[in-house]
Amino acid sequence: MFLMPEKTKKLYIETYGCAMNVSDSEIVASVMNGEGFTNVDNEQDADVIFLNTCAIRDGAEQKIWNRLRAIKAMRKQRPGMIVGVLGCMAERLKSKLLEEDRLVDVVAGPDAYRDLPNLIRQVEEGSKAMNVMLSLEETYSEITPVRLNSNGVSAFISIMRGCDNMCSFCVVPFTRGRERSRDPFSIVEEARQLLAEGIKEVTLLGQNVDSYLWFGGGPKKEFEKITNEQKAEAITFDKLLGMVADLSPELRVRFSTSHPKDITDAVLYKMLEYENICNYIHLPVQSGSSRVLDLMNRTYDRAWYESKVLRIRELIPECGITTDVISGFCTEAEEDHQQTMDIIQWGQFDFAFMYAYSERPGTLAARQYADDIPEEVKGRRLAEIVKLQNGISKQKHEQFLGKTCKVLVEGFSKRSKEDLKGRNDQNVIVVFPAQHYKPGDYVNVKIERATTTSLIGKVVE
Ligand code: SAM
Ligand code: SF4
Ligand code: F3S
């Protein structure tokens, strides 16, 4: 008789960084559960603690070092406990993470999660263990993620891994390796299973979803060599969107991140065609200055970016658009900063993630340009950007006043168990009195109040 491994050991995973890491932690949980580990949500009870880390800015890494030191102190009472660092910081720093005694036992990069049980065994046998090999193929396609901290309503699905762009400020191509697309049929199957489990919203994830391409599993550079008939059958991102959206009109489909250089009309038309593909695009601009965009190696200039925003608004006027901005990139003059302020004013984005530039060792920018903007100047410019954007976010949200939004209920609001929260089509958080509604319901909410971050209203039948 086949016996499942006895579930005796306890695993605690803490996830930092972007949605991709959230999705990866679910792969890690699946791999470890297969080896007899159960997930716990409390570090005190854990036999193994994994920190799934981010390396995007120095601050993200400092947070992890502090956390590791705190765990080291706690470990004095738990000598058998194993501590692992996974994800982007593991990939970037490799064996440097193993140098300090009793700080870290296991280091595993984003493509090495199948090897985790083996790495844990090595530690149990008395040595430290590391696997930071990046892969050209790994997509974890056939691993069924174990949903951690799920709200039971929405879920992430990774459709690709890595990034082939070389934005000069960015560490991701080094920590996550080459871009690979995942088999579309495994993506649709994962969405189908989620739907069967009651999930009502999936977000398709990739660093650059518009460059998703599947033509039987070959590397992207082989695409040019295939016949025109084969090319016509290849699955591009717009087709994938349609395949997932076809599963059920009850399933909302979102996606992130779109790259201004690659987003196509085909994707916009697909959004128009399907009611259940949400009218929301995250389109990072990074800077309003074409000179800085060139140094950032974003491969578009300001006019190109603006033409993409105009096209989105022409085809889908109600589409929510959000962005990312970096202030204080190398050589950024006051005039460049003013151009960033100007594109924020022009773009009227619903929301923006705004950062001060943080030099990342090994990136193109770190090798080629001096990080020459003083921290206080970066900070001052960032504060100006945040102030401007917050005002715009509030105004944008005020445009919903008096309107009725279809909201997918996710759970209780942060502040009160009397209120529920969910998101509208444009991804804005909507809060309303709970009454008899529950997570997973679609409700129509008439908006009565708007803040910088959310909308408040009441359900109308
Ligand atoms: N792939 C997406 C893209 O192309 O926009 C997102 C990549 S990254 C995970 C998210 C955001 O972090 C970027 O859009 C950028 O604004 C910011 N970021 C990346 N590297 C940074 C750095 N060195 N300093 C400050 N912000 C950075
Ligand atoms: Fe980084 Fe650019 Fe790739 Fe985004 S597209 S992950 S910013 S290199
Ligand atoms: Fe994401 Fe941070 Fe890695 S933003 S891809 S976890 S460097």
Image (cartoon, helix red, strand yellow):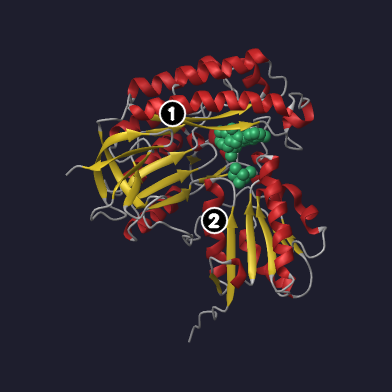
Dividing the image into four quarters, tell me where ligand 2 lies.
Answer: top right
SS of the residue under disc 2: loop
* 293 and 244: which is toward the camera: 293
Q: Is residue 125 above or below residue 168?
A: below
Type of residue at label 2? Answer: Tyr
Kindly report the distance in space between the C-alpha atoms of the residues bearing marks 2 and 1: 37 Å
**Are discs 2 and 1 less than 8 Å apart at CB?**
no
Location of the C terminus (image quadrant): top left
231 or 27, nearer to the observer: 27
Number of residues whose C-alpha sits closer than 10 Å to that of mark 1, classed few (under 14), some (14–19) or many (20 or more): many
Residue at the location (52% across, 18% down)? 343
Residue 374 in view here: yes
Residue at 76% across, 75% down: 125
Q: Which residue lies under the disc numbered 2?
A: 140
Q: Position of residue 417 (x, y in %)?
A: 35, 55
Numbered tag placed on residue 393 in the rendering:
1
Horizontally, residue 145 falls left or right of residue 252, namely right
| Residue 272 rendering spot, x and y as whole percentages | 30, 31
Q: Looking at the image, which residue is at 71% across and 58% down?
A: 68
| Residue 24 % position (x, y) | 55, 54
Residue 423 percent coordinates (x, y): 35, 42
The image shows residue 433, relative to residue 453, as above or below, that is below
